[in-house]
Image (cartoon, rainbow, N blue to C red):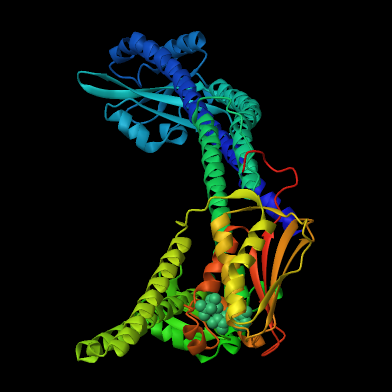
Amino acid sequence: MATNETAKKTRTGSIQWRIVLIYILLVSIAMTVAGVFIINQLGEYMMDNVRTRFTKVITENMQILASYDDLSASRAEIQNDITAWSNSLSEEIYVADNSFEIIAASNERYRGISAFEVLDRTLVVRTFNGESTEIEETTASGVPVVSFLYPIQDTSGVKGIIVLRADVSNVYETETRARSIFFRSMAIALAITVILSLLISRSITIPIKDVTQKARKMAEGDFSQEVSVKSNDEIGQLAQMFNMLRGELDLTISDLTSEKNRQSTIFRYMADGLLAIDRETRNVLLMNPAARNMLGLPVSESGMFPYSRVEELLGSEVRFDRMWKNAEEGGVRDILDHKGRIFDLRYDRFKDDENEDAGLIVILQDITEQQKAEAMQRDFVANVSHELKTPLTNIKSYTETLLDGAASDPETASRFLSIIDSEADRMNRLVKDLLQLSRLDHKQEKMSMKELDLVPLVRSCIAKMEMTARQKSQTIEAVFPDDLHERVVMDKDRMEQVIQNVLSNAIKYTQDGGAIRVGIREEADENRKKWVLVDVADNGIGIAESEQARVFERFYRVDKARSRAMGGTGLGLSIARQIMEEHGGTILLTSPGLGLGTTVTLKVPHAPTRGVRGIE
Ligand code: ADP
């Protein structure tokens, strides 16, 4: 019902109907004005004709009437004259003398009566004053007539009046007929106007309706709408503008969409966690996956959810009210410690479209690793200084003692000098190791990779270390077949350095008389990739489980004094690990526990079976 009413309202209020109405009004006004004017002019014209005819008769005959000295006395002659005129004129004529009596008349009824009985008194008086007058009236029988009153005068003055009365019913009839013709033609004209104006207004409104309809579709998101431009007039220009607007909008919207996509991709993949919180509702409006991971929230918490959930998780540091107040003067930076992870927390207020503070943007950056690296860097520098300082202090104190006179005792001098020598050696080893580590860190260590058989290298390392082992009454046994061959791509010198380091550790950290067994085997992983593994197993002091992973850290030693006494720098295993990684391999250390021996395993990829020729 309501829709029908609206439709009706729209139809009557539409431009089309307004145009039709305007046309009807214009045509009716124009025709009425023209019709009234023409009909009036026609009546005037016809009356003028009567008037001209009468004036002509009067001017022709007035002299005759004026020549009678006494009108009353000459009434018989005058009656004759009038009868003659009225025959030729077919109008009523009568003459009144200065006593207002009608002395002669074409109509017998008027003869002898007072002029005032048949004529308007003022008109009669005015005519007797020398003025020609006229009057339109309707007779008792309903005939429209017009009377012309002329004074009969000579030099002595007005002697009487002559009245000519004409039947003007034909004038009125003509006017009535003209009016009816006018009304009929007006009806026809209006009918034509309605049809024409409907056609004209349709030609205007159809393109407008087309534009409106397409604009509606555009508002619903369909930008494929193109309006056909049929003319170069205002409507054609409107259509052109619409098409231009559509193009621009399409472009702008696709720009916006791709910008939005770009932003949402950045938002999704950015490493920093981002949260937007609404001030009014205290809801989290936006949260990227990084933030969800950092806060350990389930995936279900990705839509809008109350910020109090985050407050519960992270504690008072990130209470909304606290952050809101802190951010009053601008962005704030804080450190947040949550479940062993360290976050760089930054937040600031964001504004809405009316430039009012609308909420908070929080950015979380997990800086745990960064902090760890910084701490490691600090520790490393402290360790290096400490490791260098110890031999330096020793060298300095022994040198001073020698200078203070100990040199005079050759035995003491020689002992001291050998200590100084071994401390200098230690420093030299340390500096050499440090330099190699630094080269490995900066990928500056030159590696000369070749495909070689690893087995002979292991055998030669064992042979080289046998002397040292023998000094501690230890045995080193190769527990792999004599004819074994394992080809790997390696830098022979660096690989030798690693094997020797591992063997020397086994000797160092195994009591006298211990046994060291070296095995070589092959292994395939789940991707069927082949690896070559070298196991160096001793039955020495072993390592507690908690310390097994730490021995690869720089300067980490289970027993500092023992390592130092053995000439160790605490850098051997970290260098070994880095070299193994350069080979695409690893180094592993396992021990069942203290006193239960240790096995160190080197793992390198097996050279491809159909190796690239020319590597060696
Ligand atoms: P170092 O110069 O002290 O030997 P490494 O980096 O080679 O330095 O070794 C680090 C630490 O690992 C050693 O100080 C020692 O405590 C432990 N370690 C290494 N190899 C063995 C092993 N075979 N048995 C027991 N402990 C070992």
For the N terminus, give its image quadrant.
Answer: bottom right
Q: Is residue 376 visible?
A: yes
Compare residues 556 and 375 and report the one nearer the observer: 556
Q: Is residue 12 visible?
A: no
- 46 relative to 589 in the view: left or right: left
Residue 260 lies, in percent from the top left, at: 55, 55
Compare residues 268 and 587 and report the one nearer the observer: 587
- 286 relative to 417 in the view: left or right: right
The image quadrant of residue 51 is top left
Residue 174 lies, in percent from the top left, at: 57, 21
Q: Residue at x 66, y 29 (%)?
A: 195
Residue 153 lies, in percent from the top left, at: 27, 20
The image quadrant of residue 539 is bottom right
Q: Residue at x 64, y 38 (%)?
A: 225
Compare residues 243 and 339 and report the one nearer the observer: 339
- 604 relative to 149 in the view: left or right: right
Q: Residue furthest front?
A: 410
Q: Is residue 213 above or below residue 344?
A: above
Quarter of image, ligand 1: bottom right
Q: Residue at x 42, y 26 (%)?
A: 102
Q: Is residue 462 above or below residue 111?
A: below
Compare residues 59 and 36 and report the one nearer the observer: 36
Q: Is residue 313 above or below residue 254?
A: below
For the C terminus, give its image quadrant.
Answer: top right
Residue 158 lies, in percent from the top left, at: 27, 24
